[in-house]
Amino acid sequence: MYGWRGRIGLIVPSSNTTMEMELHSALPEGVSLHTARMPLKNVTEEELLAMSGLALESARLLKDADVDLILYGCTSGSFIGGGEFDKELSMKIEDEVKLPVVTTSTAIVEALKILDAQQILVVTPYTDDINQREREFLEANEFDVIDIRGLDIVDNTKIGRLEPYEAYRMVKALFTDEADAVFISCTNFRTFEIIEALEEDLGVPIVTSNQASLWLALRELDVREKLPWLGRLFVEY
């Protein structure tokens, strides 16, 4: 049986081409991934809020696959409504399907906290408007955002075409010794190949949307596989 250690039910935007591939590349033996999609083409506040309203139907469909938890796999879509939006969204889905729910934004907060990160740098593919919402969300969760920079991309399929070196170069250009950690945002931004290299180069933890999402989902399943190529988060915690 696929998923004999646990089944993750993943909800992603319809235009996301990265998250499933990255998670599949790192799933421990016996853990399976099953996906539902919600309509989204552009990373704008209007489309993100409309998309979140469709999460319940996606979760109901995934429950038919007898999944063990629901992972809401969209960073901006799980913080766009403010500091408590991720928790409110989780509660709505849990009430509907009676399963544990993890959102990407919740996973990011938990990862940064367990890594004792306080002052963080953030790189994203987003516009300034979405970056401002992300800053507000992180600051509402008691992190000090030293700086946040984006690529001003709205079309989500264009984000999915970015190579990992784009994230690597953005982080290296922005980095300052004041930072306790770096967060690379967006589940459609490919990062798995560069996490270990950045940690070695900079000497601080690197947290990415897909890495943190997988980490917290596996913890919820009580699967604590060490994956050193995904950084300190998967080695120490």
Image (tube, rainbow, N blue to C red):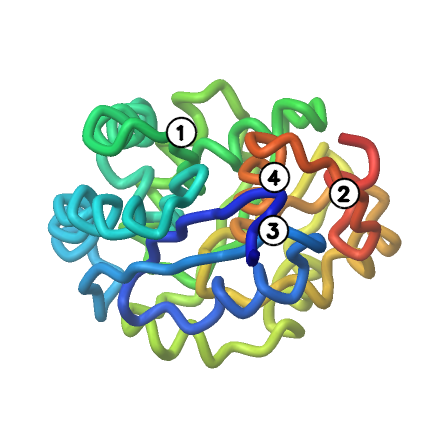
- Dot 2, crowdedness within 10 Å: few (<14), some or many (≥20)? some
**Tag on residue 31?**
3
Earlier in the chain: of badge 1 and badge 4, it is 1
Task: Give the residue type that dot 2 points to.
Answer: Glu
Secondary element at image label 4: helix
Real-space Cα separation, disc 3 to disc 2, in angstroms: 11 Å
Quadrant in the rendering for residue 182: top right
What's the residue at 82%, 40% (across, down)?
235
Task: Give the residue type that dot 1 points to.
Answer: Pro
Earlier in the chain: of badge 3 and badge 2, it is 3
Where is residue 60? Give x, y as percent: 21, 45
**Tag on residue 22?**
none
What's the residue at 62%, 41% (across, down)?
215
Earlier in the chain: of badge 1 and badge 2, it is 1
Q: With respect to residue 78, does 153 lie above or below?
A: below
Task: Give the residue type that dot 3 points to.
Answer: Val
Earlier in the chain: of badge 3 and badge 1, it is 3
Task: Give the residue type that dot 4 points to.
Answer: Leu
Q: Is residue 183 left or right of residue 114?
A: left
What's the residue at 15%, 57% (across, down)?
47
Where is residue 205? Give x, y as percent: 75, 41
Real-space Cα separation, disc 4 to disc 3, in angstroms: 9 Å
User: Can you tell which of label 4 and label 3 is closer to the viewer?
Assistant: 3
Q: Which residue is mark 4?
A: 218
Secondary element at image label 1: loop
> What is the quadrant of the C terminus in the image?
top right
Q: Which residue is mark 2?
A: 225
Verify CB contact (< 8 Å) between mark 4 and mark 3. Answer: yes
**Tag on residue 100?**
1
Where is residue 37? Give x, y as percent: 27, 62
User: Can you tell which of label 3 and label 1 is closer to the viewer?
Assistant: 3
Q: With respect to residue 1, does 68 lie above or below?
A: above
